[in-house]
Image (tube, grey):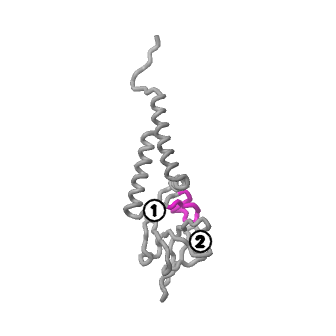
């Protein structure tokens, strides 16, 4: 149990350092649109990307234009399938890998927007990350501390069988 709590704490520390030092963000995959590579429940690891560095084939995290912006404000993770160059700037066509056709929107890179490129995918961790984010850092810290003391208490209550055998009288 102590090993699990230590691993979780170290993972949180590494994630925090990556977030602060490199701009790494963690985005839970909530829908099946990027299957099979990113099934729901996965965690996408992303890095910020300047609009001029976006290329066809990259999986981006972005907010679609109105009226397609999700009501909860969460971003979309979809692949860039085409880039068109106009006098006013570049426009992207995107598509979820599992979707039959392109997205109904075009992403105009000349406007204000934040973009990130998916650099890694961690299966099954997105559900935990989403729950931790919704719970908040205080609740997460309390849960980790509780797990630690639960493990500590269990070690005190359960006798170890360190080679000693109880002999009857």
Number of the label disc, if any, that sits on residue 160: none
Q: Which residue is mark 2?
A: 69
Query: Where's residue 83, x and y in %?
Result: 49, 80
Count residues near mark 2 (Cα–Cα under 10 Å), then give few for <14, some for 14-19, many for 20+: some
Cα separation, mark 1 vs mark 2, equals 20 Å
Q: Residue furthest front?
A: 138
On the question of residue 22 being in view, the answer is: yes
In the rendered image, the vertical position of residue 100 relative to residue 27, given as above or below: below
Main SS type for the magenta part?
loop
Which residue occupies 41% across, 76% down?
A: 53
Count residues near mark 1 (Cα–Cα under 10 Å), then give few for <14, some for 14-19, many for 20+: some
Query: Where's residue 85, x and y in %?
Result: 48, 85
Whether residue 39 appears in magenta in the rendering, the answer is yes
In the rendered image, the vertical position of residue 70 relative to residue 168, given as above or below: below
Q: Residue furthest top?
A: 169
In-image side of 121 versus 68 (left or right):
left
Query: Where's residue 91, x and y in %?
Result: 51, 81
Q: Residue furthest bottom?
A: 87
Q: Of marks 1 and 2, which one's residue comes earlier in the chain?
A: 1
On the question of residue 83 being in view, the answer is: no
Q: Nearer the viewer, residue 115 or 100?
A: 115
Q: Secondary structure at mark 1?
A: strand
Q: Quadrant of residue 29?
A: bottom right
Q: Which residue is mark 1?
A: 25
Task: Tell me the magenta residue range.
Answer: 27-41
């Amino acid at each position: 149990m102590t090993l699990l709590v230590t691993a979780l704490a170290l993972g949180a520390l590494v994630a925090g350092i990556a977030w602060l030092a490199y701009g790494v963000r963690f985005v839970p995959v909530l829908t099946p649109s990027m299957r099979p590579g990113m099934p729901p429940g996965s965690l996408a690891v992303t890095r910020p990307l300047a609009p001029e560095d976006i290329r066809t084939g990259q999986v981006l995290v972005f907010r679609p234009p109105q009226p397609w912006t999700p009501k909860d404000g969460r971003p979309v993770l979809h692949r860039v399938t085409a880039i068109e160059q106009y006098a006013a700037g570049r426009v992207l066509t995107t598509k979820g890998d599992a979707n039959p056709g392109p997205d109904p929107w075009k992403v105009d890179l000349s406007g204000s927007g934040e973009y990130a490129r998916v650099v890694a995918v961690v299966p099954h961790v997105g559900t935990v990350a989403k729950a931790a984010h919704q719970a908040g850092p205080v609740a997460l810290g309390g849960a980790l501390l509780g797990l630690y003391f639960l493990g500590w208490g269990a070690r005190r209550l359960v006798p170890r069988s360190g080679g000693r055998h109880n002999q009857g009288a």
